[in-house]
Every structure is written in structure tokens, then in C-alpha cells.
């Protein structure tokens, strides 16, 4: 399996930062490897301090749960099948959108987590990163 | 950016204590700096022990999330955009009203957190502190 | 048993603050009740952020262990009877000097914790608080 | 007080990465702000996973304790004045060298933490970052 390199992680950070900037947002941006361990992180000037842990844990959750964190937003509702999931793993599971696995040749090689705007905005930025990652993989 | 001094924090504690006393309440009162670190705290006689952490985490949340904690009460409801936010950051995010940032010249320089009464009462006390802070800043 | 009141706690905070100031130090000062729960806290301008938890945990330890924290400095040395004590209780036990129980009529009614200078300096400030407390009790 | 910007933090990360590369090391590199909160982080390919937390906590410690972490290595020895300091603050205090405060105009504006080589090597890399920071401040 190909490993996510720091070089690639830096390019993805840059994509997320530029996308945030274009949207008028100050984001926390985290990238983890296939073991859900942090590779690279940045907090844009004036971004929320609370977003440090949230972005890291979104990235962590996307790899650890093998799905986008947005999938959990519905599933964790009271009465839904995964109600309560977000209090497991010492609270590291985040059910807010904005964490997405990075997939290469069918394998999860890492994850991206964004925190700074609304969940919808965080998802939009994370998607831009995923697209950039797929483009890099093809080129 | 101006730093919130202990001298100012003490005056704000005093405002919160007197307001609580007038309302017949025993409050936990916490003031944090711009890094969300505790500057000053007091627990009025007979105030709830659980309120120690709640008041500190309300103040922490107001700075870390850059908004009053009351804004999160609705947003964190099941089905709302921030559902699940209160289990992030090791549970330090509080979604009960009563935590408000202290703003000086457009910058968040600290935060106040109150816990002792109902959320509505805690908010009323926190608002009294914010008004006193704004008055101090002008005089 | 007499309860430690907020009124008394404030006077003790003030003693510690003035003593620190005279010694040219910026201290974190914490006072807890007989349940080892925080009553009042202040961080002097420019005091170390790490001292917030250390001062609180010194006060907590003095009540929870029913002894000055300085007693543990020797006892927790490798080969001594309490070696390892400071990793119990989720690390809340502090073995640095500067935490002392407050005793009234033979009962521990609370504790003081100081963090800002060397352990010797922190102990000196804590002792000044204990003396002030004993004086208050007699008058 | 001047704030440490992301732009500066990126340049410092780059200095640390290049210095590590020249020394044949794979480092974890963390930069925090004046509130000891993470601004930017990177883990070089093949760097130790344990170093993620160590580098962050070295940076955190340097700001929270207002001193290089190397100062604590001796002070925390059994029988020395700060024995036991490293189990306070939930174990976030690191007494290994490689964390150094970043000082601008006499104020601590942030900190750097390095973990990847021996403590001596981590200190050498952190020192290179401090020198670069001072150079940037003058130019």
C-alpha cells in the first residue's frame, strides 16, 4: 500500500488553506495517516482554538471508522443505529461533517479533517482536498 | 491586543458575585484569558460543586468557540448542524448558556462563565459582567 | 465542623498575592474546601500557565492526602515508601512543595496551593497563608 | 504583544525540517502560540509516532513553564527541586530537551517542540528554529 507522504500532506494542507481563504473562513486543517496518526496540521490566523482538537479528531474518525464523519451525523441521532457512538473512544469520535478518508487504489491511506466554518462549509473544504488528492494520484 | 489583567478580572468577579447575590443565587464564576486559561475563579458559599467545572468550561468554550455558549444550545440539538459538538475536546465544550466572550477593540480578550442557577439566570449574570467590562473599557 | 467560607478564602488569596508580590513573584493561588473542591483561584499577571493545574492540584493533594505536599517530596523518591504516589489519581497528586492543609479545631477544613516560584518559595507563600488563617481563627 | 502568525510558523517548520534532514533525522515538529495552543505541526516521513505528542507537549511546556524544557531535565531528577513536575498537568509537562519558547520584544509569543532524535539533537534543531525566529524578527 502506498503511504501518504509529508510532501503530499503539505500539498493537501495548502489546498485546504486556499479553499478556506476563498470562502472567507479561518480553518483548522489536519491530515492523518493510515494509522489515524497526525502527519500535518495548521491553524489559520484567528481560527477557533476549539477547532484544533475537532479537526484532528475528524481526521482520526474518518480513518478509524472508515467513513466520512458526515455519515455519522444522521446515524448518531437519537433512535438511529449509532446513537451514542460519539462518546466512545474517550470522545475522539466526531459526528460533525468535515472528516473524510483519503483513498488510494481502494485502500484508506489517511484522512483529512476540517474545522472552522459550519459543517457544510467544512465538508466543502474537505471535499476539495479529496479531489486534489485524487488528481495527484492520477498524475 | 490588550491583555485581560487580574485587576480587571477581580472587578468582574465582584460584579458577578453581587448580581448573583441580588438574584438569590449561589454561583460558580470563572474568568479566562484569550488563550482560554483560567485567570480567576470563585465559588459562592453553598454553590453546586458540579458548577466548578461547568463555569470554567463555559468560559473556556466562549473563547475557544468564539461565541456565547447559548448559541450552541440550539445548534447542538439532534438534527441541528452542531449536534455532537459537546462531546468533542474531551467534553470541555459546554452547550448550556452562561459563557460569553469578553471583547475589546474587536478582539476576544477573554471569557466569563457562570454556573449556579438556570441557564437563563446564568446568562443574565454573565450579561451583567459583559456590560461592566464594556463600561470599564470606556472609562 | 466550621466550613471555609468564600469570605475567608478571599482574604487568604489576598495574603498570598501580597506575599508573592513582595517576593517579586507571579503566583497561581488556589484554595479548596474540605472536599478538596476549588473555592477560589487567581493567577497573577504573567504567572506560568502550567501553574494553574499545579496550584489547584497542590491544594487538592494537601486535603486528599491530609498532609503538606512537601512531605511527599522525600517520601516519593525512588526507594522511599511512597515512590509512585504521584502517578495515582490520574496524576492529580502533586509531590512538589507548596500545598498545605488548613486546619481549624483539629479538623482539615480546606487547603492552599501555590505555584509560581521555586518549591521553597511556594512553600514560604503557603506558610504565610496558613499563619494568616490561624490568626483569623483566633480573632 | 505581537501574535505569532501562521506565515511565520510555516517558515519555522521549514527551518526545522531542513535542519533535521541535514542531520539525517526524521522529526516531529510542533509550533504553539502564546496560549500554548497548536498553530502548525508536521511529522517527517518515518518519524516516530510517539513523537507527535512529545513534540506538541514540548512546545506546550516551553510556553506553559516559560522556559526551555531542557531546564527541567536536571531539575526533575529525584532529590532535585522539581522532582515530580512531569506528572502534573495530566502528564503534558515534558522534561526532555527540545522545547524552547519563542520570545519577541521580551514576551513569550509561542514555542517550538522537536521530537525525533536524541534530546541533544532535538535541542540543536530547536535552537536553529529560535535563531531563525530572531533573524526574522530583526528583518
Image (spheres, coloured by chain):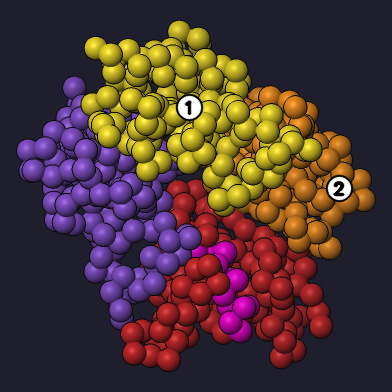
Chain colours: A red, B purple, C yellow, D orange
Q: Is residue A8 above or below residue A62?
A: above
Asked if residue C42 shows in the view, the reply is: no
Query: Looking at the figure, which quarter contains the C terminus of chain C?
Result: top left
Mark number, residue A92: none
Name the subunit of mark 2: D
Please tell me which residue lies in front, B103 or A15: B103
- The residue that mark 2 highlights is D117
Name the subunit of mark 1: C
Residue neighbourhood size for the residue with mark 1, other residues' Cα within 10 Å, grouped as few (<14), some (14–19), many (≥20): many
Please tell me which residue lies in front, D77 or A66: D77
Seen at 71% across and 56% down, the residue is D52
Seen at 48% across and 27% down, the residue is C100
Say what secondary structure mark 2 lies in: loop
- The residue that mark 1 highlights is C100
Assess whether residue C57 is covered by the magenta stretch.
no
Q: CA distance from mark 1 to mark 2?
A: 41 Å
In the shown orientation, is residue A134 left or right of residue A49? Answer: right
Query: Looking at the figure, which quarter contains the N terminus of chain C?
Result: top left
Seen at 53% across and 82% down, the residue is A68
Residue neighbourhood size for the residue with mark 2, other residues' Cα within 10 Å, grouped as few (<14), some (14–19), many (≥20): many
Give yes or no for contact between labels 1 and 2 (Cβ–Cβ under 8 Å). no
Q: Is residue D109 above or below residue C93?
A: above
Asked if residue B125 shows in the view, the reply is: yes
Say what secondary structure mark 1 lies in: strand
Name the chief secondary structure element in magenta.
Answer: helix
| Residue sticking out furthest to the front | C106
Q: Nearer the viewer, mark 1 or mark 2?
A: 1
Q: Which residues are magenta?
A: A54-66
Please tell me which residue lies in front, C119 or A47: C119
Seen at 78% across and 28% down, the residue is D74
The image position of residue A23, as x and y in percent, is: 43, 64
Amino acid at each position: 500500500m502506498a503511504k501518504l507522504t509529508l510532501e503530499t500532506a503539505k500539498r493537501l494542507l495548502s489546498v485546504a488553506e486556499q479553499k478556506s481563504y476563498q470562502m472567507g473562513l479561518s480553518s483548522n486543517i489536519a491530515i492523518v495517516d493510515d494509522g489515524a496518526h497526525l502527519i500535518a496540521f495548521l491553524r489559520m490566523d484567528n481560527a477557533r482554538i476549539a477547532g484544533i482538537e475537532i479537526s484532528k479528531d475528524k481526521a482520526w474518525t474518518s480513518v478509524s471508522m472508515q467513513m466520512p464523519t458526515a455519515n455519522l451525523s444522521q446515524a448518531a441521532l437519537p433512535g438511529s443505529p449509532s446513537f451514542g457512538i460519539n462518546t466512545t473512544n474517550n470522545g475522539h469520535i466526531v459526528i460533525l461533517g468535515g472528516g473524510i478518508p483519503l483513498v488510494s487504489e481502494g485502500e484508506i491511506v489517511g484522512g483529512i479533517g476540517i474545522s472552522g466554518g459550519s459543517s457544510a462549509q467544512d465538508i466543502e473544504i474537505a471535499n476539495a482536498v479529496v479531489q486534489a488528492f485524487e488528481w495527484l494520484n492520477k498524475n
